[in-house]
Image: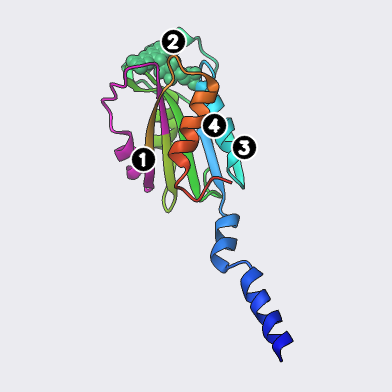
Amino acid sequence: MKKYIIVVLSLLLYAPSPLAAQEISKKTLIVYYSQSGKNELIAEHLGSKIENSAVKKITLKEEISFGSLIFKHLVRSDLEIEEIDVKEYDTIIISTPIWLQILALPTKVFIESADFKGKEVYAFITCGGYYGFAESLEEWIAEQGAEVKGLFVIQVGGKTDEDIKKEISMHMKDTALLK
Ligand SMILES: Cc1cc2nc3c(=O)[nH]c(=O)nc-3n(C[C@H](O)[C@H](O)[C@H](O)COP(=O)(O)O)c2cc1C
């Protein structure tokens, strides 16, 4: 009898809980835009730390010069980007630079075209030194139906890649996402 009790107790202790199984099967998509590599670093770092994740870069449909892109960014003109399908993911993490104190245009276009209904969204915003963000990113994301779980500003100017990675891990440590 004692033997049976021990077996049953062991099974109860070591069987994965349904909640844990649910967490493991959740999928995360990390979407980034980057010109000089910092947001790529952030996205790849997150991808290496989050189970069941994929990393996708926002790319333009047509290649244009950086000068033309900045002009379009300034006048907030239309811009065509390759479609990024977020359907199969539960959590979306966006990583994006600030240009001239507003959200980089390719990321703005991505957010406005995405359906975040029922998804949890985190956003990382990088800036050189001064974050003068006039637009409300949090509101925009929420308008696409998401629950905004975290919005973090990372000042990348003067920081090493290792400093940036540490900062990311610090911001995400209380989420259930990190391995
Ligand atoms: C055209 C342009 C405008 C920028 N404007 C700002 C700004 O207003 N404030 C700021 O702190 N950083 C500014 N930066 C710095 C970027 O935010 C920084 O280079 C970016 O976050 C790095 O990301 P990336 O390496 O992924 O492109 C600007 C950079 C560029 C290229």
**In the rendered structure, which amino acid carries the disc numbered 4?**
Ala
Q: Amino acid at mark 3?
A: Ser
- Residue 112 occupies which quadrant of the picture? top left
Tell me whether circle 1 and circle 2 mark residues in contact (CB < 8 Å). Answer: no
The answer to whether the residue labelled 2 contacts the one labelled 4, judged by CB atoms less than 8 Å apart, is no
Q: Which residue is mark 1?
A: 141
- Tell us which disc is closer to us: 2 or 4: 4
Residue nearest the observer in this picture, 95 or 169: 169
- Specify the farthest residue to the left: 134
CA–CA distance in space, label 2 to label 4:
25 Å
Task: Please indicate, yes or no, whether residue 33 appears anywhere in the rendered image.
Answer: no
> What separation in Å lies between label 1 and label 3 (alpha carbons)?
24 Å
Q: Split into 4 quadrants, where in the image is the N terminus?
A: bottom right
Q: Please tell me whether mark 1 sits on a helix, a strand or a loop.
A: helix
Q: How is the image coloured?
A: rainbow
Tag nearer the camera, 1 or 3: 3
In this view, the residue in front, 38 or 34, is 38
Q: CA distance from mark 1 to mark 4?
A: 18 Å
Q: Which residues are magenta?
A: 124-150
* Residue 131 position within the rendered picture, expressed as x and y whole percent measured from the top left: 31, 22
- Mark 3: C-beta under 8 Å from nearest atom of ligand 1: no
Q: Which residue in the protein does label 2 denote? A: 68
Looking at the picture, how far across and down is residue 36, in whole percent? 52, 15
Distance Cα–Cα, label 4 vs label 3 = 9 Å
Q: Does the beta carbon of the residue at mark 1 sit less than 8 Å from ligand 1?
A: no
Q: Earlier in the sequence, mark 1 or mark 2?
A: 2
Q: Which mark is residue 43?
A: 4
Q: Amino acid at mark 1?
A: Ile
Q: Secondary structure at mark 2?
A: helix
Residue 6 x, y percent position in the rendering:
69, 81
